[in-house]
Amino acid sequence: MELDKCLEVLYKGQLLPEVTIRALCFKFKELLIKESNVIHIQTPVTVVGDMHGQFHDLLEMFSIGGRIPDTNYLFLGDYVDRGLYSIETIMLLIVLKLRYPNRIHLLRGNHESRQITQSYGFYTECLNKYGGNSKVWTYLTDAFDYLVLCCIIDNELFCVHGGLSPNVQTIDQIKIIDRFREIPHDGAMADLVWSDPEESDHLNPENGMDPNNLEEFFKPTSNQFQVSPRGAGYTFGRAVVEKFLESNKMSRIYRAHQLCNDGYQVYFDGLVTTVWSAPNYCYRCGNKASILELYSTNKFYFNVFEEAPENKLLKENFNNTYDDSGRITSKVINDYFIDDGSDDEDESFRDVDVFSEEYQARSASLRSVQYFL
């Protein structure tokens, strides 16, 4: 299938045949294997944070920021899991990369992983949309192994999905990582996709910090790497950031990986910025999203946006699908979820937050290939 034809299908939110996905993933790997672990690009470029399978919000983002190839894009990872349309989201980005390889760049996030996608929805989505004998999940997770780890913009803006690592002091150390594999549990590669900045509130004068209290000022959490509460990667403070930037002649770090209520969050007086691009995360968090439009190294704009209208309709349909006995009544939802006629199944849907991770995991096993488009 021609790439332009694939894009026409994908922009409509339709699925490609499995044989086509197999061929596209092969071409995708052929393209990415030529790229370094650290790619270099120039402004202007728009930086995009986590999308997490929120396909309609991806289209909304393109309508706000401009479509490819009219706008250059750098995506910071986490394309799949949690949202209802991970396959549609990642396949659109893969085909755009194949069609316009110099206009869009894709970094690897911690969710571009076999282990993580088996727990947070993507694996189940692939089986339910393509059948139990499908290899779509295998094709795509194999392709994830080829995604690059970092990007440098204008030779001074360092971009990564998660953050810094105690095992990485220089950019050259990133370039020699063997990235063509599953993300390991620890080490430099894991840290780059899992770590988070941590700005200690006790150092903020607005929070009552006494500048003359040296014991308070030199608390260890203010500077060094600390074990992350996520169970992978580290948290890191301002001193770590300043040392990394100085050693590598960089000026700022842009990353994703953390939900931001306002769509973005600035740390350490602008040395680190988190960009988050999934509005109303998991269709329930109520947060805004943003894309970072970089016109030059020091000229930029956070373009903040809210969820796509289709997501609001989706939520309304979910909220109006129960009668007094707890049974699903909406035709839209009955079309979307297979009804096996089991009273026990109906019982399991009662008094449940339909936007919780538990509900999405439960209902994913009943999902059929129907769309709200």
Image: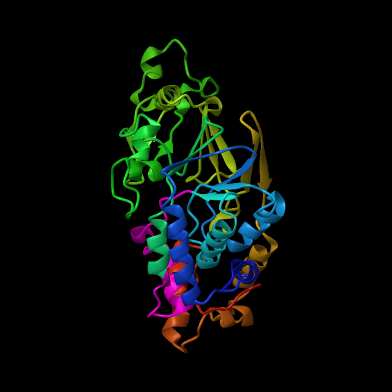
- Residue 333 lies in quadrant: bottom right
Q: Residue furthest bottom?
A: 341
Question: 329 above or below 361?
Answer: below
**Residue 121 in magenta stretch:** yes
Residue 38 image point, x, y percent: 44, 41
Q: According to the image, what is the colour scheme of the structure?
A: rainbow
**Residue 368 in magenta stretch:** no
Residue 141 image point, x, y percent: 39, 62
Question: 235 above or below 256?
Answer: above
The N terminus - image quarter: bottom right
Seen from the viewer's position, the closer of residues 274 and 32 is 32
Residue at screen point 46% across, 78% down? 130
Q: Residue furthest top?
A: 212
Residue 113 image point, x, y percent: 37, 57
Can residue 39 be seen in the rendering of this structure? yes
Residue at screen point 32% across, 55% down? 182
Can residue 366 be seen in the rendering of this structure? no
In the image, the segment drawn in magenta is 107-136
The C terminus - image quarter: bottom right
